[in-house]
Image (cartoon, coloured by chain):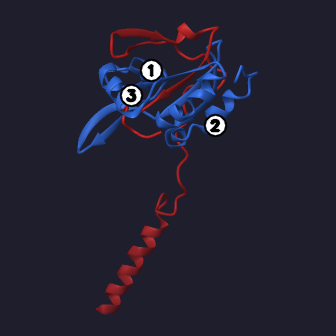
Amino acid sequence: MRNRIMKLLLLAALSLAAVPGGAQEPKKEPEPLALKPGDMAPDFTLLQYDGKGVTPVSLRDFRGKKNVVLAFFVFAFTGG
Amino acid sequence: MKAFQANLPKLEGTDTQVLGVSIDSPFANHAFALENGVTFPILGDMDGTAIKAYGLEKVYTIGGVPIRSARRATFLIDKEGKIVTTQVDAEAVDPTKIIDACQIPATKAGT
């Protein structure tokens, strides 16, 4: 009886180890972005509040003037 | 956010404007900026327009509640509106790659 239980346990452990995507799987690369270097950056107009008033800011405002680092945050309080 | 703030003089020295975007309201973003000493604009994308345009929609579950927001991503865009380099997810938390890329064009730093 005990032997049979041990055998079953061993089988169970082996079948778990054989499942692809188990704990040994290397860390996944992030899913690639739809936009790639060389693509045109989609324009947008979003609002900024500076403590006095709300102003629209568009990507095209910087065309021919400045490079733009556009940083998307999950929420303002999150890291990075 | 703080990493960009710390490197702001370096970035502005190379004719680069930093813009943050989050799904929070412009008012929440302003409060955050005040509390954390962030001086670059943080734009409010409450209906997710820019987040969708950049293919970054993602649903997070916090305390069992699904919340629609964005993947963490940074884009360096040149003066012609073209994407130069990108960083996404965990990689985007450290903006060194983006900051270094800004130093490549002829810089006007310190002039």
Q: CA distance from mark 1 to mark 2?
A: 21 Å
Q: Tag 1's secondary structure?
A: loop
Q: How many angstroms separate mark 3 from mark 1 (CA)?
A: 8 Å
The blue chain is B
Residue at figure coordinates x 38%, y 13% from the top left? A47
Q: Is residue B96 above or below residue A21?
A: above
Q: Quadrant of residue B71?
A: top left
| Colour in which the image shows chain A | red
Residue B26 % position (x, y): 34, 19
> Local crowd at mark 3 within 10 Å, few (<14), some, or many (≥20)?
many
Return the mark for residue B97. 2
**Which label was assigned to residue B41?**
1
> Badge 3 is on which residue?
B33
- Amino acid at circle 3: Ala
Chain ID of residue with mark 3? B
Question: As drawn, is A51 to the left or to the right of A71?
Answer: left
- State whether discs 3 and 1 lie on one chain: yes
Same-subunit check for callouts 3 and 2: yes
Residue at position x 74%, y 28% in the image:
B104
Pinpoint the chain carrying mark 1.
Answer: B
Front one among B10 and B62: B10
Image x and y of residue A10, in percent: 41, 80
Q: Are marks 1 and 2 in contact (CB under 8 Å)?
A: no
Instruction: Give, as a three-letter code, the residue at label 1.
Output: Pro
Tell me the element at label 2: helix
Chain at tag 2: B
Between tags 1 and 2, which lies in front? 1
Side of B25 where B41 appears, left or right: right
Q: Nearer the viewer, residue B27 or A16?
A: B27
Picture quarter containing residue B64? top left
